[in-house]
Amino acid sequence: MTTQKLSTDSQNDLAIADTARHLAEWQRRKAALLDFVALFEDGRQITVGVTCPPDKLDPVRGICLARFCHPDGLRRKVLPSIIRARFESNGKVLATYDAAALAAAYEGAR
């Protein structure tokens, strides 16, 4: 069994090319996501990527993902409430929700 040793330069070239490919793929996927930014009662702000078209925003999906991503999401049965939330795309705010609007959207989905 023989092994060939690649030079350090070719290994670095491969790593750089691979990194560029992964970065391009990440940017393509990120462009398809909308940011759902949720502010909890405890002061934490959680941002999650939600796949939905800009003309059909899905706050219920954003609520579920934000609650799951909260640091206490898997440890506590009762999490702090979300007091404000918004959908963003490339820094532009698409929609904002207060606590009452979020509760209505969440109850309407049940």
Image (cartoon, grey):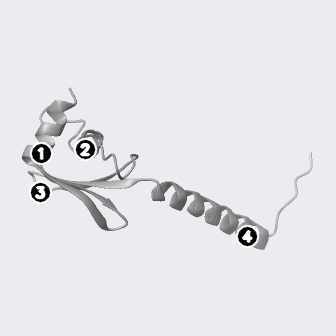
Q: Position of residue 48 (x, y in %)?
A: 32, 51
Mark earlier in primary sequence (2, 1): 2
Of the image marks 2 and 3, the number of the one nearer the N terminus: 3
Most distant residue in the right direction: 1
Give residue 109's quadrant in the image.
Answer: top left
Give the residue at mark 1: 101
| Alpha-carbon span between mark 1 and mark 3 | 19 Å
Q: Amino acid type of disc 4?
A: Asp
Classify mark 4: residues with Cα within 10 Å, few (<14), some (14-19) or many (20+).
few
Q: Are marks 4 and 2 in contact (CB under 8 Å)?
A: no
**Distance of label 4 from label 2 (alpha carbons):** 43 Å
Secondary structure found at label 1 = helix
In this view, the mark in front (1 or 3): 1
Do the residues bearing badges 3 and 4 touch, measured as CB atoms within 8 Å? no
Task: Residue at 24%, 46% (x, y): give it.
Answer: 70
Crowd around label 3: few <14 · some 14–19 · many ≥20 (10 Å): few
Q: Which residue is mark 4?
A: 13
Residue drawn at (71%, 69%) of the image: 12
Sequence-first disc among 3 and 4: 4
Q: CA distance from mark 3 to mark 4?
A: 44 Å
Q: Select label 2 or label 3 by which is in front.
A: 2
Q: Secondary structure at mark 3?
A: loop
Q: Position of residue 98 (x, y in %)?
A: 11, 51
Which structural element holds mark 4? Answer: helix
Q: Position of residue 41 (x, y in %)?
A: 8, 51
Residue at numbered disc 3: 43
Q: Which residue type carries mark 1?
A: Ala
Mark 2 touches mark 1? (CB < 8 Å)? yes
